[in-house]
C-alpha cells in the first residue's frame, strides 16, 4: 500500500508540475506585450477666430 501511495504522489507531482509549466507559458511567455503601448496622437492646431 505504501508503494502505491508513493507512486500516486509522484504522479500527482508530475501533473502539478505540467499544469504550472503550461500556465507559466500561457501567461508569461506567450504574452509578449505585458504593458500596452501608448501611441502619441498628434492633433493639428488650427487658429481660432475670436
Image (cartoon, helix red, strand yellow):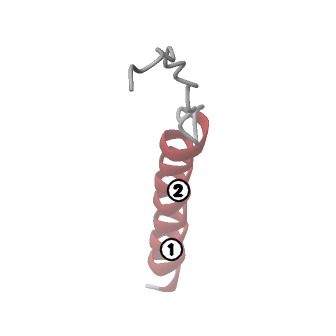
Disc number placed over residue 31 in the picture, else none: none
Quarter of the picture holding the C terminus:
top left
24 or 32: nearer the eye?
Answer: 32
> Gap in Å between the C-alphas at discs 1 and 2?
16 Å
33 or 38: nearer the eye?
Answer: 38
Question: Taking 47 as reference, is 39 above or below it?
Answer: below
14 or 20: nearer the eye?
Answer: 20
Residue positioned 56% across, 49% down in the render: 24
Q: Where residue 6 appears, x then y in whole percent? A: 54, 76
Quadrant hosting residue 49: top left
Is label 2 in a helix, a strand or a loop? Answer: helix
Disc number placed over residue 20 in the picture, else none: 2
Tag 1–tag 2 contact (CB < 8 Å): no
Within 10 Å of the Cα at label 1, are there few (<14), some (14-19), or many (20+) other Cα atoms?
A: few
Is label 1 in a helix, a strand or a loop? Answer: helix
Name the outermost residue toward the bottom.
2
Residue positioned 58% across, 42% down in the render: 35
Question: Taking 32 as reference, is 46 above or below it?
Answer: above
47 or 33: nearer the eye?
Answer: 47
Q: Where residue 46 appears, x then y in whole percent? A: 46, 14
Residue positioned 48% across, 40% down in the render: 26
Residue positioned 50% across, 74% down in the render: 9
- Mark in front: 1 vs 2: 2
Pointer 1: what residue?
Answer: 9
Name the outermost residue toward the front.
50
Within 10 Å of the Cα at label 2, are there few (<14), some (14-19), or many (20+) other Cα atoms?
A: few
Amino acid at each position: 500500500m505504501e508503494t502505491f501511495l508513493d507512486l500516486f504522489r509522484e504522479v500527482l507531482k508530475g501533473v502539478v508540475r505540467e499544469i504550472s509549466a503550461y500556465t507559466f507559458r500561457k501567461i508569461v511567455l506567450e504574452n509578449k506585450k505585458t504593458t500596452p503601448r501608448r501611441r502619441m496622437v498628434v492633433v493639428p492646431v488650427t487658429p481660432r477666430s475670436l
